[in-house]
Image (cartoon, grey):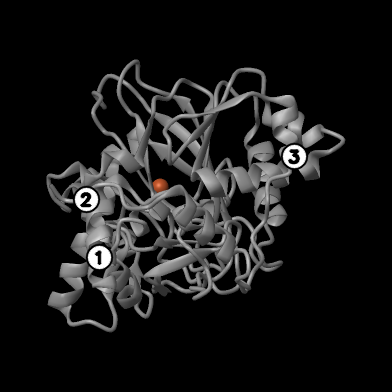
């Protein structure tokens, strides 16, 4: 029988204590728990997703006397849990934009990073340039372009706008019309994907960068289905129509100080320091870890006026197009905050290391054999 349990609580406690001495480029933020005094929430899954019970309204938080404390606590909660759900929100899009912008500010984003103007959003549209409309009607219009990617639903996993040099820290999506069944969104934890890598493979990845491109948007424009906004798109760095950026493969989240895999199926095209074949091999493995491990996912069933707020630095998501587009409409509005330029901090840690909890069950036998070999 192989050894199954290798990491004692004592070893983990020592690891957690030793991490406190590390000096990070950006000091992680701690929760002040001001939200918990007022509102009840629960973990939807052990490693990802928190949902608030009925009674919380973002509008009340914005108007609260201690709004700054509450918003800061909210930002840390989102960064730690990847995604937070709030049901039945009475909130205008202007208030939604204000909240997501303040969330990013509270978490310390650069002064030059504002709200994203998506390259496909018409700046003169009703909601303005800082809105991204998520619509089954539009999806139907764009269907031929997007469906050319292949038959696997998992091909659509992504984090938002990583083709921008300054991508998103937080995003808020309010679904206003939803089908009676279907149309769920799934999120995956990039922290947890990193926690499933072997120590040597982590070290290898930490020196690498990848190129991200928004080539599908070019295809839409070439097909005459959209006009691209040359920017600046919410930050001075996000300008021009290349829609291409280079980012580290392993990214540190400044709010938590935790590492995550920052490569996604839709936008990440190539690991720059590797040959094309090597890059495909490594990216496929990273994508498979994120899409085939449903124990690092959370799935949300939308009702009208529900809001999800997520940290794009450390999570991936995908919508489910399983409902009849001819019969039902799914319509939502997203406001997207821009954060910092992605970076890797060698002193940052994995989420499980940071929390002092055992490695994933699937990793323990392998780590035990490594430890046994090291001491033999
Ligand atoms: Fe998205």
Quadrant for the C terminus in the image: bottom left
Residue 215 location (% of width, % of height): 30, 65
Above or below residue 357? Residue 89 is: above
Q: Which residue is mark 3?
A: 70
| CA distance for labels 2 and 3 | 45 Å
Residue 207 location (% of width, % of height): 37, 80
Q: Which residue is mark 2?
A: 3
Which comes before the other along the chain, label 1 or label 2? 2
State left or right for residue 156 relative to residue 13: left
Q: How packed is label 3: few (under 14 Cα within 10 Å), some, or many (20 or more)?
A: many
Q: Are marks 1 and 2 in contact (CB under 8 Å)?
A: yes
Above or below residue 322? Residue 358 is: below
The residue at the far right in this view is: 65
Q: Which residue is mark 1?
A: 372
Q: How packed is label 2: few (under 14 Cα within 10 Å), some, or many (20 or more)?
A: few
Residue 35 location (% of width, % of height): 71, 33
The local secondary structure at tag 1 comes to: helix
The answer to which quarter of the image holds residue 293 is top left
**As rendered, which of 246 and 344 lies closer to the eye?**
344
Q: Nearer the viewer, mark 3 or mark 1?
A: 1
- Whether label 2 lies within 8 Å of ligand 1 gets the answer no
**As rendered, which of 54 and 207 lies closer to the eye?**
207
Residue 132 visible at all: yes
Q: How packed is label 1: few (under 14 Cα within 10 Å), some, or many (20 or more)?
A: few
Residue located 42% across and 39% down the image: 134
Residue located 34% across and 33% down the image: 136
Above or below residue 148? Residue 334 is: above
| CA distance for labels 3 and 1 | 47 Å
| CA distance for labels 1 and 2 | 10 Å
The local secondary structure at tag 3 comes to: helix
Which comes before the other along the chain, label 3 or label 1? 3
Residue located 45% across and 53% down the image: 352
């Amino acid at each position: 029988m192989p050894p199954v349990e290798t990491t004692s609580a004592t070893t983990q406690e020592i690891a957690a204590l030793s991490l406190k001495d590390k000096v990070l480029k950006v000091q992680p933020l701690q929760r002040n728990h001001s939200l918990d005094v007022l509102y009840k929430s629960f973990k939807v899954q052990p490693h990802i997703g928190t949902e608030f019970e009925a009674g919380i309204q973002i509008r009340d938080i914005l108007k609260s006397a201690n709004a700054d404390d509450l918003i800061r606590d909210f930002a840390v909660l989102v960064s730690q849990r990847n995604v937070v759900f709030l049901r039945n929100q009475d909130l205008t899009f202007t208030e939604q934009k204000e909240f997501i912008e303040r969330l990013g500010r509270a978490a310390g984003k650069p002064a030059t990073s504002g709200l994203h103007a998506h390259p496909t959003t018409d700046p003169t549209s009703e909601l303005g340039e800082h809105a991204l409309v998520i619509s089954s009607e539009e999806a139907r219009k764009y269907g031929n372009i997007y469906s050319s990617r292949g038959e696997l639903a998992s091909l659509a996993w992504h984090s938002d706008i990583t083709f921008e040099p300054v991508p998103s820290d937080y995003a808020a999506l309010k679904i206003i019309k939803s089908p009676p069944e279907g149309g769920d969104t799934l999120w995956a934890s990039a922290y947890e994907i990193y926690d499933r890598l072997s120590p040597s493979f982590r070290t290898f990845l930490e020196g690498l960068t990848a190129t991200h491109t928004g080539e599908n948007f070019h295809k839409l424009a070439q097909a005459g289905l959209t006009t691209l906004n040359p920017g600046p798109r919410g930050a001075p760095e996000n300008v021009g129509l290349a829609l291409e950026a280079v980012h580290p493969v392993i990214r540190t989240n400044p709010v938590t100080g935790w590492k995550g895999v920052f490569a996604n199926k839709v936008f990440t095209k190539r690991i720059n320091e590797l040959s094309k074949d090597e890059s495909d091999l490594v990216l496929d493995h990273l994508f498979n870890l994120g899409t085939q491990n449903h124990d690092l996912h959370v799935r949300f069933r939308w009702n009208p006026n529900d809001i999800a707020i997520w940290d794009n630095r450390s999570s991936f998501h995908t919508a489910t197009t399983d409902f009849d587009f001819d019969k039902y409409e799914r319509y939502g509005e997203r406001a997207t905050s821009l954060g910092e330029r992605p970076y890797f901090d060698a002193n940052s840690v994995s989420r499980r290391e940071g929390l002092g909890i055992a490695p994933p069950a699937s990793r323990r036998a392998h780590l035990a054999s490594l430890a046994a070999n090291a001491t033999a």
